[in-house]
Image: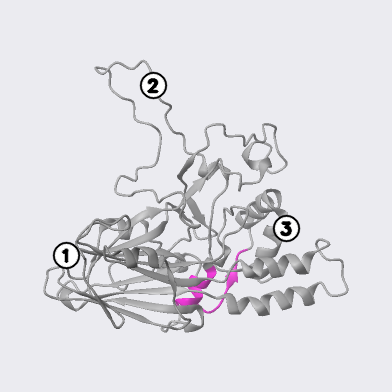
Amino acid sequence: MPVRLVLRGLILVSVDRDERNPEKGKITAHLIDGAQSLDHAVHASFERYKGKPEPHDHFEDCMRKHQGHHNHQGEIQVFDGSATSDKAGLVPLAKKQDLDIQIDPANQNYVDAAPSYDKFMPDLRKIAANVELIESPKLNHDYISNTVTINRGVARVRTIGEWDAGSIAIPKEIRVNKKPNSYNGEKVYQPQAVYQPAMVRFLNAGVVGYVATECVVDVEDANSVKVGDHDYSPTGAASRRAAENTVEILITNYAPQQDIALPWTLHYRWMFQAAGFTKAVSLAGKELDDLAAFGRYYEPETWLCESEMFLDGNDQEGYPFPYRTPDMWKVRLGELQYNDPYAAPVEAAMRPEVRELQLSDPWDPIACPMGNLSPGKS
């Protein structure tokens, strides 16, 4: 039977592959949550403005609301083809509850990573080196809510970050403004806007491209799979949730959705902190200035609260984080042709080359970029 493990959300993945003896490798997924660190940041922000004019009239309420947007929760659901598992829904993982997944070793699916994993999983060590972050030899478990270990399989990327450029969750000024705006003096109206792949740039790190938001671990042929204390095997029946004769394990780590789609992920700093990079660096410079100008135009209250919580309150220190601006989510898609004879060559549409990837379902929760901390080859 095939086994498929799907990881979605703010997760730090490590593929420990020994090319000399791959049967001894393992895959580790650390679910990231640094919400407890925000209490200090929010309190410090309130203290900073005590006795002074606040940025806006309801500043404290706004800060507390945005603080609640960053409580990540690990959840799991196992699909084996039975009606019971299909209807079970995602079950929350208790904080600090670690989970061991054992897939029987009587097959050739050793631990490895497909090319898409190396191509689209952000390598935290390489990004950190670009901004001279100081690495610690140990993980910081204060930022890890759960750890999932898998004894075998091949890790690959199935989904990269997308942007629903026409969504009503994007502020109207960005989505439908036909006039030059105060952000960059250019028109941002995009009548052809659709849900599409979007590049991100890591602030001050010189890293840009398409970033994984879903990682899949595949085992082609197994006899059994044990998740914690429970054994699973497929019923063989057709299911709306997973392929027949397949056990699929879905693990997510999302925070509550917001009513406004944000083109930045400031809480990505928790990935670096969990990985042991303990000291923030200066992020000051033109790139941050330009992003702050866009943030204040895009949604000023949200940008202010997020920067107060994650950029140490002064927009100057922090960790690299992925963001996108309108020029990065404008992918030019070819229009339908209604008079193109078969004999004529079809002109390729101008779009990113992501043939090995599939876009996620549009009703999935908001996507959080993932990260890679694999040792050795990565």
Dot 3 lies on which element?
A: helix
Q: Position of residue 206 (x, y in %)?
A: 48, 56
Instruction: Give the mark, 1 or 2, whose residue is nearer the N terminus.
Output: 1
Give above or below for 339 relative to 75.
Answer: above
From the viewer's perspective, tell me whether residue 213 is left or right of residue 329. left
Q: Say the numbered circle drawn on residue 301.
A: 3
- Under mark 1, the amino acid is Met
Quarter holding the N terminus is bottom left
Residue at the image position 37 percent from the left and 56 percent from the top: 120
Q: Nearer the viewer, residue 161 or 210?
A: 161
Q: Position of residue 243 (x, y in %)?
A: 25, 56
Indicate whether residue 351 is drawn in magenta: no
Quarter holding the C terminus is bottom left
Q: Nearer the viewer, residue 220 or 85?
A: 85
Rounded to the nearest angstrom, the CA distance separating label 3 from label 1 is 51 Å
Q: Say the numbered circle drawn on residue 337.
A: 2
Magenta region: which residues? 269-283
Q: Say the numbered circle drawn on residue 1.
A: 1
From the viewer's perspective, tell me whether residue 2 is left or right of residue 318. left
Rounded to the nearest angstrom, the CA distance separating label 1 from label 2 is 43 Å
Instruction: Give the mark, 3 or 2, whose residue is nearer the N terminus.
Output: 3
Q: Nearer the viewer, residue 161 or 325?
A: 161
Residue at the image position 39 percent from the left and 42 percent from the top: 352
Residue at the image position 14 percent from the left and 71 percent from the top: 223
- Label 1 vs label 2, nearer the camera: 1
Q: Position of residue 30 (x, y in %)?
A: 41, 75
Dot 1 lies on which element?
A: loop
* Mark 3 residue crowding within 10 angstroms, few (<14) / some (14–19) / many (20+): some
* Mark 2 residue crowding within 10 angstroms, few (<14) / some (14–19) / many (20+): few
- Under mark 2, the amino acid is Gln
Residue at the image position 67 percent from the left and 42 percent from the top: 172
